[in-house]
Image: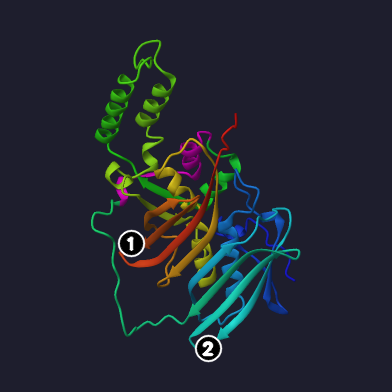
Amino acid sequence: MDPPIRPGSFPSPIIQYIEVSTDKSDPNTSVSYPDFHFLPSRSVSIFGGQVIAQAILAAHAAVDPDLDIHSMHSTFVDKTDPKQPLIYRVSKVRTGNTVANLVVNVFQHTRLVFMATISFHRFEKEPVLKHNTGLPTGFPPFDMMTAVKRSDYYEMIFKDGLKGNDEILLAALEVKHLMPSQAVINDEVTKLKDFFKGTSNMPIAGAGQHEAYRFIEESLRSGSLAKLVAQASSATSGVIYQYMKVNGQVGQSSGHRTAAFAMASDVFSSQLPAVLIPNKNLLWITSLSHVIYFHKPFNPCDWIAVENIVSVADGGRSLVQMKYWTGDGELVATVMQEGLFRGKRKSKL
C-alpha cells in the first residue's frame, strides 16, 4: 500500500483532500487516511464532497485511462468518523471497449458509509449527434459578480456563520454571486421600513430603534445578505447564479479534474434551499444523494458559470439542480443533489 499523500507538493490546494492511496497489487482498493479528512463546521462526518471526489479517483484507478467518466450516482448511507480511514472498494460490473460500469462501496471497518455507481465512456471527438443548450439568455456577466464564501451562507441561514476550518475551502476554490444593485437594496430597505411601521411597538428611528430592524438594515446595506442571492426576480423563482473555479492547477489527469470538480460541486449545493427559503427553526442540513453527469471534458480551474435551481423543498427533503457552462458557453456538467433538513424541536407544554 502506498504511504499517505503529504500536503505541500501540489499546485492546487484541493488535491490533498481528494487524493487516495491505491494498492499497486490491487487497483480495486484505495484508502483515504485521517490526516487529510475535512470535517466541516456543524458536521460530525467527513465532508461529503471529499468522499465523492475520492470515490471518483478510486474508480479511475481501476479502469482504462483512455476512458472518461460520464456519470456518477451516489448515496450517503451512514455518517463517517473523521478519525478512521475510508476504504474504497471498486467492483467492475461491465467493461467494454468504449463503456465501463463500476460500483464503489466505501467502508469504515466493516460498516458501509457510501456507495456509488460510476460509468465511463470513450469520448467521441466526432459524435454522430451534437447539440448543446448554451448559456441561458440573460445570465449575469462575470464582472457583475461579487465573491462569496461558504461561511456567508451559514451566517444567513444560522446567523452564526462557520468555524475557521471551513475557510480551508477559500484556498481550494473561488465562487462569485450576483449582488443586487443599490437600487434593489434601497427598495428592500423601504419595504422593511413599511413592515415595521405597520407593527406596533417597533420603532425604526432614534435611540429606541428596534434591534431586529437595525440588524437587517445594516446587513442589507453592507451587502452581507445581498451578495448571497440573485436579484429579487430570480430569487423568488428559486434560481441562484454563480461563477466558480478550483484554485491552482490539477494537471491533465481526467481523474483529478473530474474529482476536483466533484468536490467543488458539493460546497454550496445542500445549503441553496435554505438560502432561498429562510427558516429560523432550521437546525441542520445534510446530503442524501449526489448525481453528476459529465457531458464533455473540461478544466475546473477555469471559471465556470453555474445556474442553481431549487426544484422542491418539502417533507424534510429538497432537490437542487445545477448546470455548469464553460467560458465558451458549452454545457459541460449537470449535478442534482437531494438534501435532508431538520428543524428545532418545539417545546411541549
Can residue 114 be seen?
yes
Q: What amino acid does circle 2 point to?
A: Gly
**Residue positioned 35% across, 49% down in the render:** 238
Q: Nearer the viewer, residue 109 or 263?
A: 109
Choose between 255 and 197: the one closer to the eye. 197
Identify the residue at horizontal 38%, vertical 53% (top origin): 243
Q: Distance between the Cα atoms at labels 2 and 1?
A: 33 Å
Give above or below for 91 relative to 181: below
Secondary element at image label 2: loop
Q: Report the residue marked by disc 2.
A: 96
Quadrant of the image occupied by residue 344:
top right
Specify the segment rendered in magenta: 142-160
Q: What residue is shown at x 30% (from left), y 78% (from top)?
A: 130
**Three-letter code, disc 1:** Gly
Mark carried by residue 30: none
Q: Which residue is mark 1?
A: 327
Q: Is residue 46 above or below residue 293?
A: above
Q: Is residue 221 magenta?
A: no
Q: Using the image, determine if residue 203 lies above or below residue 315.
A: above
Q: Where residue 293 appears, x then y in whole percent?
A: 44, 69
Q: Is residue 88 left or right of residue 52?
A: right
In this rendering, is residue 21 above or below 265? below
Task: Sort mark 1 into few (<14), some (14-19) or many (20+) by Cα contacts within 10 Å.
Answer: few
Residue 305's x, y, as percent?
36, 57
| Image quarter hosting the C terminus | top right
**2 or 1: mark nearer the eye:** 2
Q: Earlier in the sequence, mark 2 or mark 1?
A: 2
